[in-house]
Image (tube, rainbow, N blue to C red):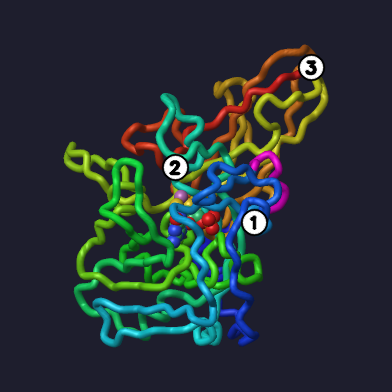
Amino acid sequence: MEETTPGSTQAAPTSTAASSPPPPVPTGSSAALFPGLITREQEPLNLELPFPTLAERLVPTNQFYVRSHFPVPAVEAASWQLSLEGEVGQALTIDYDELRRLPATTLMATLECAGNGRARLAPKAKGLLWEQGAVGNATWTGVPLSALLARAGVQAGAQEVIFEGADQGPVNDEPRAPGVIPYARSLPLAKARQPEVLVAYLMNGQPLTPEHGFPVRLVVPGYYGMASVKWLHRITVSAAPYAGYWQTLEYAYWRRTHGLPTLVPVAEMLVKAEIARPALHEFVPAGQPYRMFGAAWAGESEVARVEVSTDGGRTWQPAHLLDEAVPFAWRLWEFSWTPPAAPGRHTLQARATDRAGHCQPTTHDPDRRNYMITKIASVEVQVG
Ligand SMILES: Nc1nc2c(c(=O)[nH]1)N[C@H]1C(S)=C(S)[C@@H](COP(=O)(O)O)O[C@H]1N2
Ligand SMILES: [Mo]
């Protein structure tokens, strides 16, 4: 397998996007537009992919999970504007047509919600109880953020870039927000300048759906989903670390520095494999080969291998990776398992290792709070 530099294989500009007329104004949103997804919450809309239905490396847009903290805002492409301000030489605003006339990049990237897998935590975690499917892989087309930053001219002393969505509301659960707030997150300047970070307007080759951020969203390959701000309308370059609600009170975890726990924002995705099939409690015929199947991803690194255990983690055997390593995109895998001839219950596990040698833990570290749930998952099946 080839070692690849992030962004190098696919971040090459692919022509200037067409200036076709803006797509129609979105009209509300509903779970009915996403047949087959599990509704975790109706309002705001939160939908999960039933992971056992996974079929292809690219998840069709109408099967791609939806994670929203506020009602989906109706943003019109014709009146949408993005402003870029703060610690820049020349603040700028750009509209939808101008954005689509700039040199664009298309890349494949996996987004996973930092809370994916929360349903497996014991004791019962707070927050939406995602099982396996708050994750998806799609192609994204947009303008590299670095090009916009270069155009505005980032001032010396800038540290972070803050991204604001057009969605907003109160947060009524504890910890409460101070009144109505928008969804906003920041990136360290160094990440914001990477060629893979896109101001995106196409998903799987089509205009974004309202639920996935129409007309324009940020896509931050390698980071958990919370960084990929939807309905993006304002970018602020900041000389100080941003300490907003979704950066500190939510989507933050404890890191120990000099023995002191310190809250830090959730950022890079950690290596993880998931089993799509068999599904939990599936019936597997005895004595004949069964094709186990799943996906694995590794944030800013790359999946080096996936292994399967059919004996409760005592021994591990290599799974077969079905597709090429592409930076930031998951890889599908399969493993042929022949269960014993005798009926009984069996526990199947899968784990992934990234290029840096990181593997998955067997227990969830409480310092991660209810985020970054990568402990090796078990699927219990009935052989008969
Ligand atoms: N404006 C805005 N952007 C957002 C969110 C949001 O609620 N509002 N949710 C974030 C979270 S937590 C995730 S996991 C991803 C989900 O993207 P998707 O709904 O397209 O799958 O969007 C992120 N961007
Ligand atoms: Mo998320």
Quick one: label 1 or label 3, which is nearer the N terminus? 1
How many discs appear? 3
The residue type indicated by label 1 comes to Glu
Task: Give the vertical position of 292 relative to 96 (above or below).
Answer: above
Magenta part of the protein: which range?
50-58
The residue type indicated by label 3 comes to Gly
Circle 1 or circle 3, nearest the eye: 3
Image spot of residue 230 (x, y percent): 47, 63
Q: Mark 2 points at which residue?
A: 358
Quick one: label 1 or label 2, which is nearer the N terminus? 1
Mark 3 C-beta to ligand 1 under 8 Å: no
> Mark 2–mark 3 contact, CB under 8 Å?
no
Q: Between marks 1 and 3, how big is the CA–CA gap? A: 35 Å
Image spot of residue 15 (x, y percent): 60, 84
> Mark 1–mark 3 contact, CB under 8 Å?
no
Q: Name the residue under label 1.
A: 324
Identity of the residue drawn at 55% across and 42% down: 40
Examine the structure image and report whether residue 13 is included in the region drawn in magenta.
no
Task: Give the vertical position of 226 relative to 92 (above or below).
Answer: above
Q: Between marks 1 and 2, how big is the CA–CA gap? A: 20 Å
Image spot of residue 118 (x, y percent): 47, 36
Q: Name the residue under label 3.
A: 384
